[in-house]
Amino acid sequence: MDTNILLENGTNELEVLEFLVDGNSYGINVAKIREIITYQAVTPVPNAHPSIEGIFMPRDVMITAIDLRNCLQRGQSEPKGLFIITNFNKLDIAFHVDQVVGIHRVSWTEIIKPGTTVSNPEDGISTGIIKINGKLIIILDFEKIVTDISPETGLKMTEIDELGVRTRNDVPILIAEDSPLLNKLIVDSLKKAGYENLIHTENGQEAWDVICECKDEGTLDKHVKCLITDIEMPLMDGHRLTKLVKEDPATKDIPVVIFSSLVNEEMRKKGEALGADAQLSKPEIGNLVRIIDDLVL
């Protein structure tokens, strides 16, 4: 299946691949997918996490295979089906699924944020739900799935300690990040690095509303000197937010830092075309602080 579908920059749209596990429909952002292949035999890894099926080497690249059925607490997968090979946070991971249904093009405004009855914001592995032809498709949080299995793949908080003693400052920074856990970690990291004047929002729309309100009040310079944004967010994604900021004469000089698990070669080109001042993969929290220092101090 061809997953190299190109979307125009900043349209607030995404392609979602629908797949089945144990008869239920789930989704993944096509931008995370390298390829989809038929299941291959894997080599088990001793003392590995129960959700890790093993490792295999297509095209001489070592890839870890994760059993999504196990992650979703639906038992173990049989040695058949498909591997969805992904790339995010600079990792190549294969997810074992039963079947691929197809690709849907949707707007981020159509993504429904899971309520607390579906999952706890910090513990759940769903980032959103979409309704297609009367059917609900749960978009899984693949970053959290991987981090839960292997915590060292998440934000490397020790990088902040390695920066040493930092001077406190009141440079105002606006953050757009929909994951409650990552939002908190980014805020905590920046505060530890000396940045205390922070506004954090849950998506691009909320961040843009803050910017527009400050523009109307004439307080933009006081409240937003830098913008940090994720890419994948409901209502408005980070690329759309970057496009709006950089096309508005009143806001185009605000430095925009894209901080996302999706910063690969293709997505980096899109961010550059939209005018992003810097782009980083999410584990690089220490580099995030260094780049902000360069942009605002």
Image (cartoon, rainbow, N blue to C red):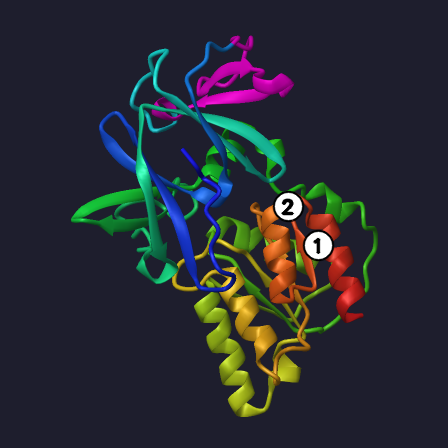
Residue that sits furthest to the left in the current view: 134
21 is higher (above) or lower (below) than 114? above
Asked if residue 282 can be seen in this view, the reply is no
Q: Is residue 18 above or below residue 190?
A: above
Where is residue 274? Give x, y as percent. 60, 65
Instruction: Nearest to the eye among marks 2 and 1: give it.
Output: 2
The image shows residue 211 at horizontal and vertical percentages of 54, 78
Residue type, label 1: Leu
Q: Is residue 194 above or below residue 159?
A: below
Question: In front: 9, or 141?
Answer: 9
Residue at position x 60%, y 48% in the image = 266
**Figure quadrant of the N terminus:** top left
For residue 68, side relative to residue 274 (left or right): left
Label 2 sits on a secondary structure element that is: helix
Separation (CA) of disc 2 from disc 1: 18 Å
Closer-to-camera residue (207/269)? 269
> Residue 265 has which mark?
2
Q: Which residues are magenta?
A: 43-70
- Sort mark 1 into few (<14), some (14-19) or many (20+) by Cα contacts within 10 Å: many
| Residue designated by label 1 | 288
The x, y position of residue 254, in whole percent, is 66, 75
